[in-house]
Amino acid sequence: MVTSAKHTDPDDSTLFVSVADGVSRALLQISRAAEVAPGLKPKARQAQLAAIHDISQASLQLLEGYALTLRLQSGHEQPELAPLSIKSLLSDTAQLLSPYAAQFNIQLELDVSARLEPILSDRNILQAALVSLGQVFIAAHSETEERGVVRLAAHKTRYGIVVGLYGKGVEMSNSALRRARALGGKAFQPYSGFVSGAASGVFVADGLLHALPAQLHAARYHNAAGLAATLPVCQQLELV
Amino acid sequence: MHILLVEPDTVLAKSYVLGLKQAGFSPHHAVSAQQAIQYADEQMPDVVVVSLEMARHNGIEFLYEFQSYPEWQAIPAILLTSLPTAEALKDDILHEQLNVHAVLLRSQTSVADLTRAIQRVMQRQGA
C-alpha cells in the first residue's frame, strides 16, 4: 500500500522552483482579479475582493508550509509528537480550506468518524501538509468535468489511521505520484494527469509528512481516489 | 461576439470572463477540452482562446481535435501560456495548421491585452 518511492527532498532546489511556480499562479489570479474589479458593480466587485483575499491566504498557507518543511529539514525545528484527535484536526483543516474551495466552486466535505482513536503526530506539521495537499486537490477537481466535491477524510485500517484527500474524476496511482516527484520543480506540469499547474502543494505535503515520519501514497476511499498518509494510532491512549 | 475560453484555472477564467463581458463580448468558459467541444457544438464561437497548459489534454491537442471538424476550421484561436519558452510556439505551423493568430504569455497579458488581441483577430477576420 505504501509506496517505496523517495519522497520530495525539501533540500532540493526543485521544491523551491515548484513553490515559486505555485505562488506565481496565485499572484497571476490576484493581479487579473484586481484588474477587472474596479469596473464591476458593487456585488461583483465585492466577490472579486473576496477572491483576492482567499487566494492570498492560500498562498500564505503554502509558503508557511514550505518554510516549515525547510526548518524541519535543517533541524531548526523538530516534530513534537503528541496524541491528537483526528476529528478536531480535520475540522480545523476544513475551515482553513473552505474559502479557497469556494473560490473554485468546490464543495469540501469532511468525512471522519468521531470514534476514531487518537493518532500520535505533530498537529502543526500534519495540518500544514493537509492544507497544502488540499489546495492542489481543490484546483485539480475544478479542472474536471465532474467538478464538485473534494472529501477530506480519515478512516481506520490495520496499518493505522489513513488521512487524506479524495475526489472523483481523477485517477491516482503510486506510479503517477512517483513520476510527479521525479518531475516536480523541473517540468512545468509535473503531475499533468492530475492538475494543470505546478502541483507544489503535493511536494510541500510530501516534505512535511516525511518529517513525522509518514509518507504520501495513492489511496481509495468510498469510490473516490485520493492521496493520503497512514499514521499510527496512539497506543498509549488506546489502552485507557 | 462569442468567445470560447478554454482555461483550466477557474479563478483566472472568472476574471477573463468578467473583463471580456465589460468589453462587450459574450464569453463562455470551458474548463477542459471536452467541455469546450461540447459548448462549440451548441454555440459556434467566433474566437477560441485556449490555454496551452491543461491537465490530461493540452491546448495543442485540443486545437488539433477542434480543427478536425470542417465547420470549425475557420475559427481563429489565441493560445495562452505560462511558459516563457513558448516563444518556440510562434511557428508558422500553429497558424497554418491550427489557425492560431497569437501566442500570449499569461504573466505579461492583462485582461485588457487579451481583449485587444481578440479585437485585432476579429479585425483581421473582417468581422
Image: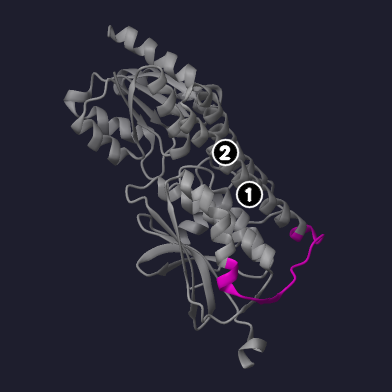
* Residue position for label 1: A62
Q: Position of residue A190 (x, y in %)?
A: 51, 47
In the depicted structure, whether residue A74 falls above or below residue A231? above
- Residue range (magenta): A72-89
For marks 1 and 2 on the same chain, the one whose residue lies earlier in the sequence: 2
Q: Is residue B37 above or below residue B25?
A: below
Report x, y in % for residue A57: 62, 45
Q: Is residue B33 left or right of residue A109?
A: left
Query: Do pointers 1 and 2 mark residues of a single chain?
Result: yes
Assess whether residue A87 is covered by the magenta stretch.
yes
The residue most toward the front is: A42
Disc 1 to disc 2: CB gap under 8 Å: yes
Q: Amino acid at mark 1?
A: Leu
Query: Residue A83 appears in which quarter of the rendering?
Result: bottom right
Q: Quadrant of the C terminus of chain A?
A: bottom right
Mark linked to residue A26? 2
| Residue that sits furthest to the bottom in the current view | A239
* Element on which disc 1 rests: helix
**Under tag 2, what secondary structure?**
helix
Residue A49 in percent (x, y) is at 55, 35
Residue A193 visible, this angle: no
Q: Tell me what residue is drawn at x 27 percent, y 9 percent.
A: B127
Pointer 2 indicates a residue of which chain?
A
Residue occupying image coordinates x 48% and y 44%? A103
